[in-house]
Amino acid sequence: MVNSKKIVYSIIFLSLLCSAGIVSAQIQPPPGVPQDFTALLTQIADKVGEIVRDLGIIMVIVAGVLYLTAAGNPQRISTANKALLFAIVGIAIGMAAHQIVNIVKETIGAQGGT
């Protein structure tokens, strides 16, 4: 009984393995998705950079609110300073995300992507 299950499972596995080539030939990526891996990474880095930049802009507003509500408290002013510093760093990284990916691609010698 155990051997017959192994045989059946082996036949199913091999048939699925053999049909994978037929199925993969019919799958096409959706429009707008890059064909090569480096272009995909560049596109992902651009989108993540936009999100980080937008969050940095929101954090500048939050830091401003922290300054306004500090009421002279040195600890709260220090917290607002840190929030503003991290927001500016986030905006800079978000704006430079595309160039950072390009520098990494040039360093490792990757081709493709824009």
Image (cartoon, rainbow, N blue to C red):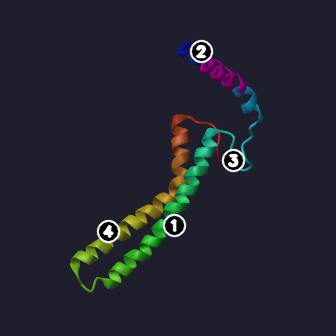
104 in the magenta segment: no
Which stretch appears magenta?
8-19
| Outermost residue to the front | 1
Of labels 2 and 4, earlier in sequence is: 2
Residue 82's label in the rendered image is 4
Task: Describe the element under mark 4 as helix, strand or loop.
Answer: helix
Task: Describe the element under mark 2 as helix, strand or loop.
Answer: helix
Q: CA distance from mark 1 to mark 3?
A: 23 Å
Q: Is residue 56 above or below residue 113?
A: below
Residue 33's label in the rendered image is 3
Q: Residue at x 26, y 73 (%)?
A: 78
In the picture of the structure, the residue carrying the numbered disc 1 is: 54
Amino acid type of the residue that numbered disc 3 sits on in the rendered structure: Val
Q: Quadrant of residue 7?
A: top right
Of labels 1 and 3, earlier in sequence is: 3
Residue 91 drawn at (x, y percent)? 47, 64
Residue 29's label in the rendered image is none
Residue 38 drawn at (x, y percent)? 60, 41
Amino acid type of the residue that numbered disc 2 sits on in the rendered structure: Ser
Q: Is residue 46 above or below residue 73?
A: above
In the picture of the structure, the residue carrying the numbered disc 2 is: 4
Mark nearest the camera among 1 and 3 is 3
Instruction: From the image, give the main secondary structure of the stretch colored magenta.
Output: helix
Q: CA distance from mark 2 to mark 4?
A: 67 Å
Q: Residues within 10 Å of mark 2 (few under 14, many from 20)?
A: few
Mark nearest the camera among 2 and 4 is 2
